[in-house]
Amino acid sequence: MDILIRNATLITQNAKREILKSADIFVSNGKIGKVGKNLKENAEEKIDAKGKIIFPGLVNAHTHIAMTLFRGYGEGMRLQDWLTKRIWPAEARLKPEHAYRGAMLGIAEMVRSGTTAFNEMYVAGMEKIAEAAETGGVRATLAFSMIDDVPGHETEKELREGIGFAGKLKSRSGRVKAGIACHAPYTCTGELIQKGKEAANRMSIPFHIHASETRKEVFDVLKKRGQRPVEYLDKLGVLDRRTVLAHAVYVTKREIGIAGKKGASVAHCPVSNLKLAGGGVCPIGEFARSGANAALGTDGAASNNSLNMLETMKMAALLQKNFYWDPLALSAQQALDFATINGAKALGINAGSIEEGKLADLVIADANAPNMNPRHSDMDNIVYAMNPSNITDVIIDGKFAMRNRKMSFDEKKVVEKACEAALDLVGE
Ligand SMILES: [Zn+2]
């Protein structure tokens, strides 16, 4: 279906970061066919977007979507207690059908808050998560999270599962793509990490790993592997343009330099870091200056508790300003870049800006809402003032994932089914 959207303000995120007023977008075959004024293209679907702002879909570069079922479960606990008494026992009961329902709930929330693609790593029900991404109309990179340096897991079995899942997804084409993931340098052997990365290279897909989220794990890695996490990953030869490091909070200047030189992506998850009280701040601005590809993520809803990338952009900008005692430390434009162009780059997808030839992943928002006015800067308003209720339409791959605030699937049923699954998991 072709779509012609007329008379909108476009936050293009093109190389010049142009903002076009009263402009049109022609969407054809899942791509942006044309951008300009008074387009005359023929389209089955025509939208008058006067009073609307359109920006590229946001990319959530690190999440665990099935964990949406654990939102608000076991609050007010210390990390170790929360994991051992709440999350792990519930996860042990998690079946593929639970993962599907959690993923659908997460997708509904993500689309409503302007996210059009996400980078997932998880352990259970991966094929059902893929099915949910297909049904929900969203773009996703999905990886089974391999782990072997903990009791009860073995390297070969993990590799079979992780690479096997990627192989299955890889044979399909379209929105839902494969990735390879290892949990973290303190929980995975060098052998697993290297073999995982080699498989990712063979398949030309992204490699995704947690790194330096907490101070404790940095010291664990130092003790176990003799180096700090990012140095260690570099020694293993896994840092390059197709590797996404999630968190990267406790890093040295040397590690920032290494990630920059290798052009690795960093998925900064500010809300999760604050909520788990890690105590540090990812120096995402320094990563960006060093040449790393700076992106943003929410992490799972169990530690956030939302999957709202609008909130994540704002939090990222505020944290850097406060951390460096410098209101210029990270601008709204940079935060938006991280969540759009850079996120798309991290996932290797041709999206993240409103330009001809790019994938048609677009968010349409109401510019007349009180919180979006006055309009001194629509771009700053998106990062600092917008909330999901301002978003009216979301187009992914040239199709409506949400139209006039109505999802493409039965949202009420998705919420009901997810709540049943959540209660089932916690044994109520
Ligand atoms: Zn995570």
Image (cartoon, grey):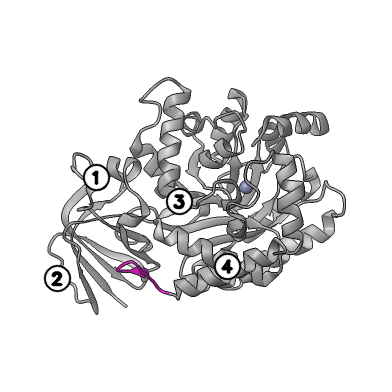
**Other-residue count near label 2 (Cα within 10 Å), few / some / many at <14 / 14–19 / ≥20:** few
Q: Which amino acid does label 3 sit on?
A: Asn
Residue in front for this viewpoint, 22 or 85 = 85
Q: Are marks 2 and 4 in contact (CB under 8 Å)?
A: no
Q: What residue type is labelled 1?
A: Asp
| Mark 1 element type | helix
Upstream in sequence: badge 1 or badge 2: 2
Residue 197, numbered label: none
- Whether residue 293 is situated above or below residue 321 in the rendered picture: below
Q: Is mark 3 within 8 Å of ligand 1?
A: no
From the image, tell me which residue sits under label 3: 308
Answer with mark 2 or mark 4, whichever residue precedes in sequence.
2
The amino acid sitting under disc 4 is Ala
Q: Mark 4 points at which residue?
A: 418
Residue 167 in the image: state x and y as whole percent: 67, 68
Q: Residue at x 56, y 52 (%)?
A: 301
Is ligand 1 closer than 8 angstroms to the Cβ of mark 2?
no
Instruction: Indicate which label's residue lies in the foreground, 2 or 4.
Output: 4
Image: magenta residue range: 401-408
Location of mark 2 (residue): 40
Name the residue that disc number 1 marks: 378
